[in-house]
Image: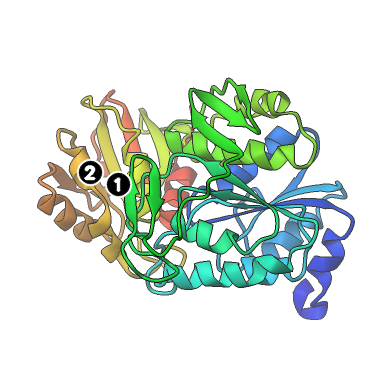
Amino acid sequence: MGLALSPRLLATLARDRTTIFVSGTNGKTTTTALVAVGWGGEVVTNETGSNMPAGHVAALAQSNSPRASLEVDEAWLAEVIRHVEPRVVVLLNLSRDQLDRANEVRQMAERWRQVLPELVDCVVVANANDPLVVYAASSATDVRWCDVPTPWQADARSCPKCTLALEHVAGDWRCSCGFSKPATITTSLGDGLVVAGKRYEMKLALPGVFNEANAAMAVTALVEVGVEPEDALTRISEVSAVAGRFSLRSWNERTLRLLLAKNPAGFDALLSTVEPDDSDVWIAINARLADGHDPSWLYDVAFEKLRGHRVWCLGERRLDLATRLDYADVEFRVVDDVNELPREQRPVELFANYTAFSEWLARSVPC
């Protein structure tokens, strides 16, 4: 309503604030939270994940803090940049998501590439291991390239410049046309976190190498607004859950770890956190508006990694999931009523996409 009455409301509310934007297909909410926590003190943020202009207006209207960490939907980044002058823009990754309405990832990269030259007095923190991000960010005037784990390369097999096949070798990538991974890297992850040539120890409560990548890029962004890496890392290391993600919950006497998995790249990364033990895996898949109506992306997820686990299929598209698991030779059970789930003491890894995740967050309680 506010934007309808005043189209410049977002620009007005953002004026005179130091703002960091975070965008990409996966990791936006977590990285935005890490930026806010790592900054310290009061920071305006859209912590609920409402990442379009209406959500930004709602967040900024709630606080007069001069600092803002805002998650921005990748499809809206160009529009938001034209209303707000950020100090830093963090570009995490680009991959397929919600195929019924965002089916061409390269178009997204092109839209980013067209708007980034408009940035004034702004630093772009970009993932050097994602060729689509590199293509987009190369148009910016001031970039901090981050060499962070990016195992999902299925959406960047061909060169975004010339369409020839990219060569991926030992953490490097290049095309015969000359397009290649940037040589000047300011941030890297290996034996600790290295920012601008200085090494720091990084220990996170959040699981997975993908969260190490999120944290590395958050710290890189915070350096650009004057935060010492040691201080940012100390605060970030205490974060164990973000908006329910990765949190331990209790339901029907069982302990669940909630994991938001909404597309192939995100699902694949989260599967790497499942221990090769006898823990149960529950997967809940819906296909409502917020999820995207097309669940065919399930066939791009490497569910073969779950062989040896018992998998329980939940949600409105549980039969689609069961069919995919059958092809993957994974043992599964189809559950029509959640009250039929077994009450055992075994730990549970619960994967769910957007609306299914919200349902399980509501029906469970913190441990």
Residue shown at the point (36%, 28%) measured from the top left:
253
Camera-side residue of 204 and 355: 204
User: Mark 1 belongs to which amino acid?
Assistant: Ile
State the SS at label 2.
strand
Camera-side residue of 122 and 52: 122
Question: Eyeballing the image, is 91 above or below 221?
Answer: below
Camera-side residue of 274 and 352: 274
Camera-side residue of 232 and 337: 232
Residue shown at the point (85%, 46%) measured from the top left:
65
Question: Eyeballing the image, is 311 above or below 143?
Answer: above
Question: Eyeballing the image, is 127 above or below 296?
Answer: above
Q: Where residue 167 sits in the image (x, y, percent)?
A: 32, 54
**The disc label shown at residue 312, or none:** 2
When asked about the image quadrant of residue 159, the answer is bottom left
Are the residues flagged by discs 1 and 2 in contact, CB closer than 8 Å?
yes
- Side of 165 relative to 25 (left or right): left
* Residue identified by numbered label 1: 283
Q: Where residue 100 sits in the image (x, y, percent)?
A: 38, 74
Q: Where residue 22 sits in the image (x, y, percent)?
A: 63, 52
Disc 1 from disc 2: Cα separation: 6 Å
- Side of 15 relative to 48 (left or right): right
User: Mark 2 belongs to which amino acid?
Assistant: Trp
Point out the tag, 1 or 2, that comes first from the N-terminus: 1
- Side of 206 relative to 169 (left or right): right
